[in-house]
Image (spheres, coloured by chain):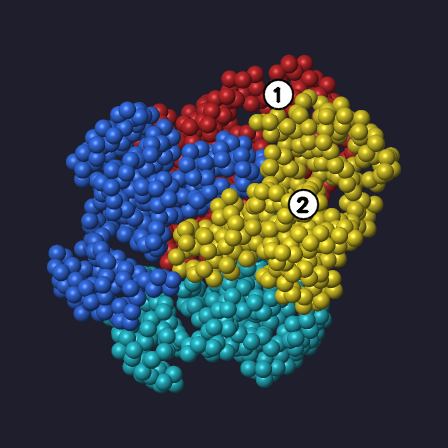
Chain colours: A red, B cyan, C yellow, D blue
Amino acid sequence: MKTSTKIKSTPSHAILLISCPDQKGITASVTNFVFENNGNIVHADQHIDEQSNTFFMRIEWSLKGFKLEQQAIGKHFEQIASRFKMKWQLSFSQDSCRMAVFVSKRLHCLYDLLIRHRSGQFACDIPLIISNHPDGQAVAKEFGIEYALFPITPQNKRRQEVKQIELLQKKRIGLIVLARYHQILSAPFIKAFSTNQIINIHHSFLPAFVGANPYLQAYQKGVKIIGATSHYVTEELDQGPIIEQDTVRISHRDSLSDLIRKGEDLEKIVLSRAVRWHLQKKILCYANKTVVFD
Amino acid sequence: MKTSTKIKSTPSHAILLISCPDQKGITASVTNFVFENNGNIVHADQHIDEQSNTFFMRIEWSLKGFKLEQQAIGKHFEQIASRFKMKWQLSFSQDSCRMAVFVSKRLHCLYDLLIRHRSGQFACDIPLIISNHPDGQAVAKEFGIEYALFPITPQNKRRQEVKQIELLQKKRIGLIVLARYHQILSAPFIKAFSTNQIINIHHSFLPAFVGANPYLQAYQKGVKIIGATSHYVTEELDQGPIIEQDTVRISHRDSLSDLIRKGEDLEKIVLSRAVRWHLQKKILCYANKTVVFD
Amino acid sequence: MKTSTKIKSTPSHAILLISCPDQKGITASVTNFVFENNGNIVHADQHIDEQSNTFFMRIEWSLKGFKLEQQAIGKHFEQIASRFKMKWQLSFSQDSCRMAVFVSKRLHCLYDLLIRHRSGQFACDIPLIISNHPDGQAVAKEFGIEYALFPITPQNKRRQEVKQIELLQKKRIGLIVLARYHQILSAPFIKAFSTNQIINIHHSFLPAFVGANPYLQAYQKGVKIIGATSHYVTEELDQGPIIEQDTVRISHRDSLSDLIRKGEDLEKIVLSRAVRWHLQKKILCYANKTVVFD
Amino acid sequence: MKTSTKIKSTPSHAILLISCPDQKGITASVTNFVFENNGNIVHADQHIDEQSNTFFMRIEWSLKGFKLEQQAIGKHFEQIASRFKMKWQLSFSQDSCRMAVFVSKRLHCLYDLLIRHRSGQFACDIPLIISNHPDGQAVAKEFGIEYALFPITPQNKRRQEVKQIELLQKKRIGLIVLARYHQILSAPFIKAFSTNQIINIHHSFLPAFVGANPYLQAYQKGVKIIGATSHYVTEELDQGPIIEQDTVRISHRDSLSDLIRKGEDLEKIVLSRAVRWHLQKKILCYANKTVVFD
């Protein structure tokens, strides 16, 4: 599991995420751009959404021997991009993303993220944990991470969010992970991180059981399978683009606490997949859905 | 797969389904009743719902050497039942259930049920297929089953349903299976088969995507997993007790027709499990949920 | 599910399957070839096996307006192919593959294939069913397909296989599907269809439970999950390249006949996926493994 | 997740695990024994293995108001047990099991067990971690658990195992969990904990890929699904009774390190289920298989 370490030390890769109206010649133009500048393609994946006639591409190439300087790549690529009316995003494997985890009282997802990070699964730094409760303080200390406590009441919520945003910006946080954070973020907060920078884990198989207490809802409904959903956060509660989901079988023998135990195992896996894909620049959003080039 | 054949020919088993308020001594009383009459328990399963303090039991015993005649068992058991305020249902493995299949244009579930029946998976007779379209006529003929065509319009719907009920009663149908029947049954129809005698397959993971076009709904929502749900039909659309569910993974690479293809494989399996469990008297309903003693 | 029909009637697509040692410029050269001849790429997928440094690609483009005649495409592409030392295979979506199904006594996979074919899931013709037992004769008749009976004994096996090969060649069969055919094909037979033209369904999660009676082996071993595996047939029994696998949970409550029932549902799905992918030219083999561009 | 806490503090339950040749009257006798002594059955589950005609039962009842003292229950039950030639095991929910974890260099299962224990999922104490490497020392310290380092060489192996056994006995350990311990235990060690007191996690879907490097074996074989297996340890390597298994889908896109990452998520879940069921006395062994009354 030396992935992240290796990525950081090597001459690095360039990653392009592209979307545009489909037409002839896109793939040829992009791959020629890489080839003519002496790049070696490591991964390439593309997708055409037939309903909207939209073309999506993720291309990753080694910069070893590449003719263009990193800072010049974008400028040169812009010529192709403008011809095809592309939206595009260029990043480099050694770019260091900084991630903050929000948590309330249930700590299983927080633990899971920190242990995966320690084992090298996430190519990022985690300099900050934010919470409305003190429960996670000991865990943060064990992992040597700053724990910022912001108790929330209906009265102070807006003010606390303003302070949270200040702290997040000061720490140059690029990705916020809501690891069972039991507060609904306000529209201004979400706008401050509006380029799909907030990932949430919802403990149901969305769109079933939106909102509070999904395990209790599932138990009372008598479903035979429960699920978990990771998604980008948008202003409409639990309605953002779905990144990943998974399910597990239950039966009448399972009590509500069994549902919670089984579901929390799902939450950890589903959330960690979404975070890893985001950090690896494998996710493209469109029409409130995602393309995941896994 | 001689199961059904074997069941029909042997001296048979008795099956008791029981539910009552939980208290001490229920299991002992029921198992003593079987033992003292020289029965040999083949299966016994019980469950206590802790929220409602309700006891559920399914007990199946061999009638070989049993001291009571079949028709006398109920009368004798009534003494125990009244002591514990039981709801109970007694049946015998050689009881012949008669099943009707309702279908519209998509025939995959109809085919699947008929082939499973032919291979001996269902201990029942299937003397009747009812449809609002002629599409399944050839299949019915291949399997030698009467195909009753009832075209439905908003104007004739109630009259056609009255005729359907007459035909079903004339054929002594005990179980109706809606195998992708694209008509909503009216309340009077459902009341005519009100003791959980109608099983439906819904092509989504309920309660997500209730109503029409669930695959299209799922496609547009961008979920990463789709499902199918079999449930008893009650007057509230797609809200009856869930018997079985299953799910399958999809991705952005799957078009709407891929979703349909993958989903139809789920539908067949989920519906066939529900039908088999119903015929084996393995399902108990309470609080709009099911206990399935599989 | 008009997929296959649509494919047959439209001006059609070209599909290239490519494998070669990885090096710079492959993707650019191939996509340029399509673009410069005015082709529109519909699907493109590539993969690099890092251990063997092998490049794999599947590219599918619309021939509408394509500058080269179908019969000239290969000749022109050969220039690129030889430069990169490619193995390649060119096909067209309207190419009609002819498939034969081999079956013995258990008919669930045969039924499943024929119903899927009838519903348009498979873009091929099925002119022939071959069996060593008469059990499937009625099914063949229902679907209007020739049923060739070749009873097999240790004494006549080689002679019967020679006759089978003659019949298959006479019928111009390009794909043989062993749908629970309980005879081991001899090496000469396999050599006669040696370019991955035989697909088998094995009723276990290979490499567990090779050989006869895998469900009994699984039952006696006490596994908690059973599986099914579809693979290309090679001379070593049950050791050919795996195309697809799936699994289902079992418990101590499942008898051997429950395992068989659950497993047969897997077999149908796993076999049908393999057949569909093969017909859509989505499978590449190397190192006794497969790349499936699904 | 107060389960374990609740169990420890309440007047407690009694749990009987029973196996014997099947005959009439077993269930009636056992449930009468509980009822006549004023016990309230909380869970009861039974199973008959038809091949060996063996009866299995797990019965759990509340001791609140029970007429017999805890220490007298066994003596009184012996009368029933001897009549039916039962093997039986009586335990109490407040019995404190003491568990030791063995680990080598990969720490994901160790972490997972300790966090679940901390959250109350396991009703046991964990006073000891044993390892042949120092890697887990910091984790042990974080959780306040003694870490005993026993470096193993071919020369010192037997002597070190003797010391390990001494330490385990001194600490009164009742359950040993091999959480990716990369040493094969010798026969004398296993004999010292011979009543199914050692649980191992094997990182493959047994019986596929026995022995070393199962992920590499799976990668080279080209399987489309990988698995994990928890089992009791017997003298034959990786051949003890299987407690639990689970699987996850992979594809050609997954590198060996992807297999490891996906597989390790399975390992944690599969191992934790086995440990929890063992601690809850839900597992019965026979014929090198398990009955799990989950």
In front here: A209 or D52? D52
- The picture quadrant where one finds residue A148 is top left
- Percent coordinates x, y for residue A159 in the rendering: 43, 33
Horizontal arrangement in the rendering, residue D43 relative to residue A150 (left or right): left
Could you give the CA–CA distance between mark 1 and mark 2, rounded to whole angstroms? 47 Å
Q: Disc 1 on helix, strand or loop? A: strand
Dot label at residue A62: 1
Residue type, label 2: Pro
- Percent coordinates x, y for residue C190 in the rendering: 66, 45
- Percent coordinates x, y for residue D33 in the rendering: 20, 67
- The picture quadrant where one finds residue D253 is top right
Residue type, label 1: Ser
Horizontal arrangement in the rendering, residue D157 relative to residue B274 (left or right): left
Q: In which quadrant of the rendered image does the C terminus of chain D lie?
A: bottom left
Q: Is residue C25 above or below residue D174?
A: above
Dot label at residue D290: none
In front here: D199 or C138? C138
Q: Sort mark 1 into few (<14), some (14-19) or many (20+) by Cα contacts within 10 Å.
A: many
Dot label at residue C188: 2
